[in-house]
Image (cartoon, rainbow, N blue to C red):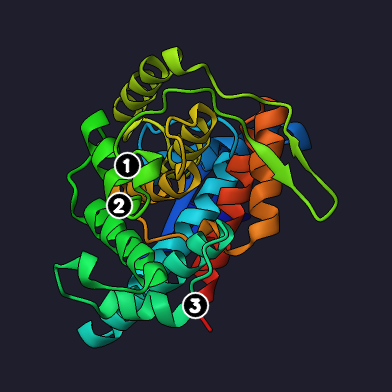
Amino acid sequence: MRIRKKTVNRQEYYYLEETLRLEKPKVYSLFLGKSLPVKNQLEIKKKELSRKIYSDLFGNAAHIYITEPQLIEIEKLRRRYVQKINRMGKAKQEEIEEIETVNFVYTTLTTEGVPITREDADLAYKFEGKDIKSIRDENLRVALDMINGIRYVRESGTGISKKFILALHKIIMADYSDKHPGRLRRKQAYIYLKSYERIEEIRFRPPAPGEVEQKLDELIKWYNSNLGKLNPIELAAILHLRFYLIHPFEDGNKRISRLLLNKAFFDSGYPLLNISKETGRYFDALIKAAEKRNEKPFVDFVAEELVRHFHSIRR
């Protein structure tokens, strides 16, 4: 922000200004008066101008953990990212979508211990056959299930439902019939932290099986009622985290969580985010948020990864 002095009819006036380079440069201005305000008053005016900019970019969307200045900076990056993508030809756009989808599938599955290669994920993306069962390679089938899951998310309408979540789980876990694809768990779930030395349960335990359906219904209602009312970044991050804490399925909860995060981003016009690419930091933020019952560490991590992603298009 900068202070600008204007002279009108030989009288000097002061304004606080900020220029944002969005689709095109836009100047936001706030009148300060005939004299410069003292330091404390100037800080109040800066917050007032920040609120004015935030309101213009996000409307009445609330924020909980991320500050208005942070959200404004991220939105600037998002719009520049969209501009650069839109300036590319259709072939280049499709190439970027393919690369990002393949990387998402590869990272998501290898993070879960599935021994697929990037070539498996790339081949799955290009596979257009409908008879998945005819594929003998199990890893390729699992990769194709995830590809189909992403496509299902992309093509779905705005908002989520229990039917949508169950169908999504059935798609991505189709090759794990023993894990009951598309069915909520009927036994207690535990979350373990694995290391080279030992495997131990974290200091958080998901709800009992009898509570799962109600908590999932409450989360679905929360998401749909906050879509457009809470800023997109926090909405997506909190949806992922709260779904993960419910752990509604016997297996595949983290995979679904990452797909739901991107469902929320797609609902708000954001691109696919490969959140588990930074595997160590991803799990650290997730476990910390779970154990401390504090959503902020995970929300901050998602925001940081989104910024990193928006910068990546420059390279």
**Label for residue 90?**
none
Q: Circle 3 is placed at which residue position?
A: 117
**Cβ atoms at labels 1 and 3 below 8 Å apart:** no
Give the CA distance from mark 1 to mark 3: 24 Å
Q: Residues within 10 Å of mark 2 (few under 14, many from 20)?
A: some
Q: Is residue 267 visible?
A: yes
Amino acid type at circle 1 is: Pro
Q: Quadrant of residue 47?
A: top right
Tell me residue 92's x, y (percent): 29, 86
Point out the tag, 2 or 3, that comes first from the N-terminus: 3
Q: Circle 1 is placed at which residue position?
A: 181
Amino acid type at circle 2 is: Ala
**Cβ atoms at labels 2 and 1 below 8 Å apart:** yes
Instruction: Using residue 73 as the reference point, say whether residue 56 is left or right of it.
Output: left
Amino acid type at circle 3 is: Thr
Give the CA distance from mark 2 to mark 3: 19 Å
Point out the tag, 2 or 1, that comes first from the N-terminus: 2
State the residue at coordinates (17%, 75%). 128
